[in-house]
Image (cartoon, grey):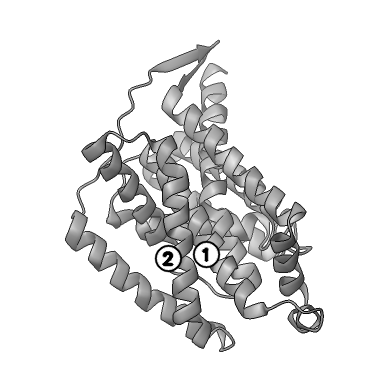
Amino acid sequence: MAIYSQILANGLMLGALYACLAVGFSLVWGVLNVINMLHGSFIILGGYLTYFAWHSWGIHPVVMLPVVGAFMFALGYALQKTVINRVVSAPVLTTLTLTFGLDMILYNVMTYWFTATPRRVQLDLGSVSLGPVTLPVDRLVGTGLALVLTLMLYLVMRGSNIGRAIVAVRMDRSAAELMGIRTERIYAITFGIGALMAGVAGVVFASVFPITTNVTGTYLGKAFVVCVVGGLGSVPGALVGGLVLGLVESLAGHWFGPQQAITAGFVLMLVILLTRPTGLVGVRGYE
């Protein structure tokens, strides 16, 4: 029984990180109908910025959160405004191909500049024990940050004018335009927020796991799974999807070995697609 308590704790902590990783991807896909193949590279870029700030200047990852967030928002906003907006109304395969090409450029630039050597911010915070469960403090802090960041996005979407405009554009673009909402601006802001959330997820991941350009595809795949499981276009959906994926991977890793954990996640995605295509939470606008 003690081993399953540990697995449950590990799965929930991992799931919270997955929710933070996927929520920006879900936002862009749900609002712009753009499958952002850059998302995994955005996460790693945020992680690299955090690592080198810590390694070169001793800047703590928590201090880097707003810095990385602002930089990634500006990068995402500029990319959408100058490049992606030119094809945003094209079939989804066109935007997917465009973001895939941009991802290949960013991936190769990062590999050239930073190399593919795994790097991690070693905070050495120790661990705490709660009965039979041992929890690394760095992962606890990362889980807390991931939940706070996800909650902040939820509150922005629910309680701000920008958030309500994004929801309006997602639900009915034509009606939103008739109400005076500038959809091109909202699209750029949405893509910027998606990049921001990917970047701050990278800050958290760099403090918990080794980061390298070799895992950009892995993180992108996990974002896909979380969106399908939880429901596209929903912050609660991303949270539920992340927690379920974290638990499934933890259990699969215990039963079948660590290498089968990723396989279990994709099996879960297929089951959800076949039995509940709208996801466990469903879609009611980006709430």
Quarter holding the N terminus is top right
Quarter holding the C terminus is bottom right
Give the answer, above or below, for where 81 lies relative to 53.
Answer: below
In this rendering, position of residue 263 left or right of residue 214: right
Density class for disc 1 (Cα within 10 Å; few <14, some 14-19, many ≥20) is: many
In this rendering, position of residue 94 left or right of residue 112: right
Q: Residue at x 73, y 56 (%)?
A: 160
Residue 75's disc number: 2
Q: Position of residue 200 (x, y in %)?
A: 47, 48
In this rendering, position of residue 272 left or right of residue 81: right
Q: Along the line of sight, which residue is nearer the eye, 33 or 160? A: 160
User: Answer yes or no: do the residues labelled 1 and 2 have beta carbons within 8 Å?
Assistant: yes
Q: Amino acid at mark 1?
A: Gly
Alpha carbons under labels 1 and 2: distance apart = 7 Å
Q: Residue at x 66, y 63 (%)?
A: 232
Q: Along the line of sight, which residue is nearer the eye, 148 or 281? A: 148
Density class for disc 2 (Cα within 10 Å; few <14, some 14-19, many ≥20) is: some
Give the answer, above or below, for where 173 lies relative to 225.
Answer: below
Q: Residue at x 33, y 23 (%)?
A: 124
Secondary element under disc 2, as helix, strand or loop, is: helix
Residue 192's disc number: 1
Give the answer, above or below, for where 208 lies relative to 9.
Answer: below
> Of all residues shown, which one is farthest toward the top?
131
Residue 270's disc number: none
Q: Is residue 224 visible?
A: no
Secondary element under disc 1, as helix, strand or loop, is: helix
